Amino acid sequence: MKSAKMILLGTAVALLLLGALSFVLQPGPPEPECAKAGAPTSGFVDDDNRDCAITIESYAEIRDYETSPKLFRIAGAGLVLAGLVVGVVGLVKRSRRPGDTAA
């Protein structure tokens, strides 16, 4: 039979790993789309390709991604925090034996 301390520490490790994994799984920003010659542009160019003027729609998608909350990262931060709390509780928890009284 596992002790409660080991279960708490195992749970803490699992939460920390899930939190870290959620940071990795956060989708990246959308790829910029180049405007065709003579078409309206956003006035911005692709950092990787200076000859590529970004379309207005593509720039709007990129800005929307950059300014929106990153749900995977928020969930990951919550899981990491929960893992740390459970880990600390697991390390501090005193196992009781039959006959022990709470002070």
Image: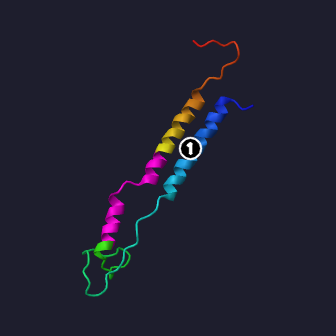
Residue 59 x/y as whole percent: 31, 70
Residue 59 in magenta? yes
User: Neighbour class for label 1 at 10 Å: few (<14), some, many (≥20)?
Assistant: many
Residue 2 x/y as whole percent: 72, 32
- The span picked out in magenta is 58-77
Image quarter of the C terminus: top right
The one nearer the camera, 86 or 64, is 64
Residue at 55% over, 45% down: 16
Q: Is residue 21 left or right of residue 73?
A: right
Q: Residue 99 is drawn in which quadrant?
A: top right
Q: Is residue 26 above or below residue 87?
A: below
Q: Is residue 93 left or right of residue 68?
A: right
Residue at 66% over, 19% down: 96
Q: Is residue 34 above or below residue 63?
A: below
Q: Residue furthest bottom?
A: 37
Residue 23 x/y as whole percent: 49, 54
Residue 76 x/y as whole percent: 48, 48
Q: Which residue is mark 1?
A: 15
Q: Residue 33 is drawn in which quadrant?
A: bottom left
Residue at 26% over, 78% down: 41
Residue at 37% over, 74% down: 32
Mark 1 falls on what kind of element?
helix
